[in-house]
Image: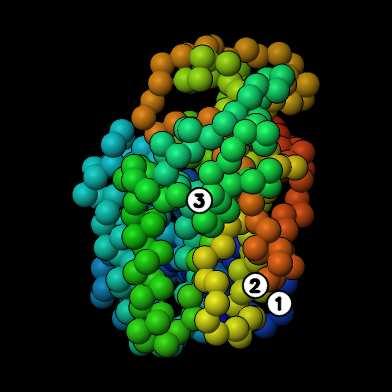
Amino acid sequence: MQVLITGACGFVGSSVAESLLERHEGMSITGIDNLQRTGSEYNRMRLRKMGVTFLHGDIRAASDFENLPAADWVIDAAANASVLAGVQGNGSSRQLFEHNLASLVNVLEYCKTHQAGFLLLSTSRVYSIPALAALPLKAAGNAFQLDCLAPLPHGVSAEGIGTAFSTAPPVSLYGSTKLASEAIALEYGEAFGFPVWINRCGVLAGAGQFGTPDQGIFSYWVNAHLQKRPLRYIGFDGAGKQVRDAFHPRDLAGLLDTQMRTARKGGQRIYVAGGGASNAMSLAQLTDWCDARFGPHSPRPDPRERPYDIPWVIMDSTDAARDFGWRAEITIDGILEGIARHAGQYPDWLERSGL
């Protein structure tokens, strides 16, 4: 099987490539990346050691696809993945749309030319911010918890957020580019006869992730705590009770692998992938974990509200379990332990991340 990964030098792209190669002898992977992200050069060297054919290119440029070999499948891991992209730092709003949406046409035209299947890594950020903010929550110790005794909106249950939850705007500029990408990808697949799978991913985390406060929060928090850098609980009364679930890209690779080997035509094409309730943690709980691992270090309360912040998101992967037998295998403790060991080995990791 020939696989092309866009954004191959990112944390997710490189981790998925590594896991797929470990799973399948004889699989051939080509990666393309513009190396714009700080630290991506580190992953370029890793990819070459794995045997991945790497090409320096920018998927916004159609001409950069001319020298790419034909693939059976394309995994699109290229994006500006910060919810603040286009609004606060990380380039302009025009650059966000060029990176996340305009470039998609070039990828899909490649799929059309080579009749390659397409796997889009989408995001939980396609879901409506007002609808998420309106979920009935209660405080359970130092974390928010869904109040399942209250009436719940369509698409959410005790298991978390599913595909049917509202995507009504606003979802953030970033979220809107991914939601539009989903629709365009499905239309291309239907019009030109190639398979499309879309996975709305929760928070991906693990050792080697280039963490920042708005992207890769678990990696950032562990590294910053170890280095005793200033940390803040922003919004929600400054208590750090906001909750997200996490899963590792190696587990994501297992889902992508199964989807590439599934010949089913028609039916559901959009799935949710995440760590679920067992892999969920609030910022305050994450601090407690770091305190036990590294010694105490207290974040500063900062109760100011920000427009894209949400108090609780846990992803419900029930559909992926039903159709593909998939669930996240690596526990949240395993993820955090891996990050902690890596942070100890690379005390300058936040500098490598561009901070």
User: On residue 165, which mark appears?
Assistant: 3
The reply to whether dot 2 and dot 3 touch (C-beta < 8 Å) is no
Q: Amino acid at mark 2?
A: Asp
Q: Amino acid at mark 3?
A: Phe
Q: Is residue 37 visible?
A: no
Residue at image coords 39%, 71%: 185
- The residue pinned by badge 1 equals 24
Residue at image coords 47%, 14%: 302
User: On residue 96, which mark appears?
Assistant: none
For residue 173, above or below residue 59: above
Which residue occupies the foreground of this view, 34 or 135? 135
Report the Cα–Cα distance between label 2 and label 3: 26 Å
- The residue pinned by badge 2 equals 257
The local secondary structure at tag 2 comes to helix
For residue 137, above or below residue 23: above
What color scheme is it? rainbow
Query: Where's the N terminus, which quadrant?
Result: bottom right
For residue 69, above or below residue 317: below
Mark 2 and mark 3 lie on one chain; the one further toward the N terminus is: 3
